[in-house]
Amino acid sequence: RCHRSAARGEMTMALDTTKAGKLLAMLGSEHDGEALAALRKLASLMLGCGETFPSLTKRLGLPKLARPLEDGNIAEARK
């Protein structure tokens, strides 16, 4: 869920990072259906809050990749 927060004098909808973190953890599931469901739920949650994957990774303190993931640079994301 999103929650309201006052930023710069405006009311905005902020992503619940606790829930987002739990959904991110579920992406590591060995069950493809569970991982896919978590990804879809996370994407839906983010869309409702106006959040993007790059902004979420920044908020959670995750490293920024220099380029989108491709077969050749997946190892970079696992570091």
Image (tube, rainbow, N blue to C red):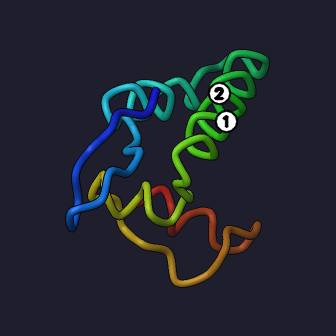
Mark identifier at residue 44: 1
Whether residue 59 sits left or right of residue 79 in the image: it is left
Q: In which quarter of the image is residue 13?
A: top left
Apparent side of residue 52 relative to residue 43 in the rendered image (left or right): left
Give the side of residue 42 with respect to residue 10, left or right: right
In the image, residue 70 lies at what x, y percent?
74, 70
The residue depicted at 43 percent of the width and 55 percent of the height is 56
Please tell me which residue is depicted at 55% across the width and 30% down the height of the picture: 28
User: How many numbered discs?
Assistant: 2
The relative height of residue 77 versus residue 64 in the rendered view (above or below) is above
> Mark number for residue 79?
none
Q: Residue at x 52, y 45 (%)?
A: 49
For numbered disc 1, what is the local secondary structure?
A: helix
Judged from this view, the residue extending furthest toward the bottom is 66
Label 2 crowd (10 A; few <14 / some 14-19 / many >=20)? some
The amino acid marked with disc number 1 is: Ser
Residue 41: which disc? 2
| Amino acid at circle 2 | Lys
Residue pictured at 44% horizontal, 63% vertical: 55
The percent position of residue 16, horizontal first and vertical second, equals: 36, 33
Say few, some or many: other residues with alpha carbon within 10 Å of mark 1 (under 14 / 14 to 19 / 20 or more).
Answer: some
Q: What element carries label 2?
A: helix
From this view, report whether residue 5 is shown above or below residue 52. above
Which percent across, then down, holds residue 6?
22, 51
Q: Where is residue 33 in the image (x, y as percent from the top left)?
A: 78, 17
- Proximity of marks 1 and 2: CB atoms separated by less than 8 Å: yes
Q: Is 59 or 36 nearer to us in this picture?
A: 59
